[in-house]
Amino acid sequence: MNPGAAILGRNTCATGSSLAQGHAVPAPRSRTRSRPPQHGDASQRLMPSLPSQSPLADEPLSKEALAEIKAHRSLFRRGRKATGKLCRRIEERLEAGDSEGARQAQRTLLGSFSAKLMAYERANRKMRADKKLPTSQLVAAAERLNPFDQESEQVMLQLKLKDDGRTRRPIHSFGINHRARQYLCKMALEPFLNPILRPEQFATRKGGRDEVARRIITGIENGEIKYFVELDVEDFYPNIFTNGGIDETSISLTDWLPLPEPVVRYCLTPKHFNIHSLLHHIPPTEGVSLTIDSRAGLSQGSATSPLIAEAICSTFLSSASPDFLARVLAFNYADNFGIGGKSAKGVKQAMLALKRSAERCPRGSFWLKEKSSRKVESGFNFLGYHFQRTNSGKADISVSEKNAERFAARVKSILKQCRVSTHNRVAIADGITELQRYVESWCAGFSLAPYVQHRALRLSCEQARHVGGQSMQAVRQAFTAAFGAEFVAGVISAR
């Protein structure tokens, strides 16, 4: 039995109209990217603050300023090594079957300055350009971080339309302090939860969505997938360890997760967050239900939630009848499930077995909803991709229409913000940079679709014509910064 699973079992029991007036759109400002986070105890002392001068400034930095920058880099480098050692110590204790030793090593990690600093570094990389902190402030914030105490930083409640176009789901938007706490918890949880995940799960695995797409393409081309059904867990995150998002189940999240109870309570459960919402934009009856959902279960938008969600979904797959799942190819990504097989009957039987397993899961109140069931010749959507078997037997893959519509809507929203901020050149530059980063992220997320960058540019140009003003110039600048002037000129000239 896996040591991590044993511990889980033990816990269970125990741009306004002014752009049209001819204002020039400034080029996006360059951003210095922080080094990528790695698992890697360093000195507890606070390093001196970085000077206000930038390495990109016209005047050269003094020797003292360069020494301070070098000291900070050394601190982060030593922090990565120390954090890596702490994570490996937890894994070694688990492999040796020493559960108590692993929990003690986990508490050491949660109190380590190095781990806190690495958590802030990862959180800072995920923040918007105007929300990022300088290195000296990251060091100071890491010294203040206490995962065993409540965080007063405000959490914004955003409401995202579901695919049906009528109902909404609550999404939490976190500041850097909450995000750092989440990444710290994620480092502490991974050695315990990763071993219990199944091969059919991909949300936290290297490759993610694209790896699922590759396996579906292979299944279609070798004849293993002739029918495909997509399922979604209805209101998954609010129902984790709750009954209908209201009352807790007999087993709570604090009992099940291998983390100290105060850490789970103050870092992971939304009922203890300082949530700020703008529900006056929503019909009153729906606003009440969304307020309840935003406080229930597990936070959607947290850096830790995908890992915990996959650990719960692994029980769906483990408890489903192995005879049915052996005849099909099953895929799980967060709360999305896909089942492909050679016969419609086999796929349906596996789907019913998975539904029954989800309904019996003691981790909350879950219901799997069938979203679509199609032959591969007719084409089907899954995880933002559209798959279809061609007459030659090859698999054709592209970005789904719904996904393209969401991309266009987001681009339009960013371009409108640029118009409103037309008198603020810094805000316009930030808007163009935001568009650049969003386009880069979207194209990288769906890199298996042929000519995804070309489609992104065409969709953005369409939205720029709708918005008007100098939005087209903003699009060109963003795509030039992302993919180069030659690419932009080639696509636009071919239109």
Image (cartoon, grey):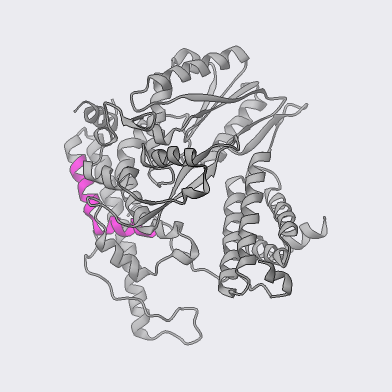
The residue drawn where x is 37% and y is 56% is 154
Q: Which residues are magenta?
A: 103-121
User: Image quadrant for the C terminus?
Assistant: bottom right
Count every numbered label the image shows and give the total.
0
Q: Is residue 245 above or below residue 150?
A: above
114 sits to left or right of 312: left
**Residue placed furthest toward the front:** 284
Residue 1 seen: yes
User: Image quadrant for the N terminus?
Assistant: top left
Based on the picture, tell me whether residue 126 belongs to the magenta stretch: no
Q: Toward which corner of the image does residue 376 lie, by quadrant?
A: top right
Q: Position of residue 142 (x, y in %)?
A: 29, 61
Based on the picture, tell me whether residue 110 belongs to the magenta stretch: yes
Q: Is residue 134 above or below residue 306?
A: below
Residue 204 seen: no
The residue drawn where x is 37% and y is 39% is 298
Q: Toward which corner of the image does residue 491 lie, by quadrant?
A: bottom right
Q: Position of residue 129 (x, y in %)?
A: 49, 64
Q: Is residue 89 above or below residue 221?
A: below
61 sits to left or right of 23: left
The residue drawn where x is 63% and y is 49% is 407
Identify the main secondary structure in magenta. helix
Q: Is residue 470 above or below residue 257?
A: below
The residue drawn where x is 46% and y is 24% is 367
Q: Position of residue 25 (x, y in %)?
A: 66, 72
Q: Toward which corner of the image does residue 258 lie, by quadrant?
A: top left
Q: Position of residue 28 (x, y in %)?
A: 60, 69
**Residue placed furthest toward the right:** 494
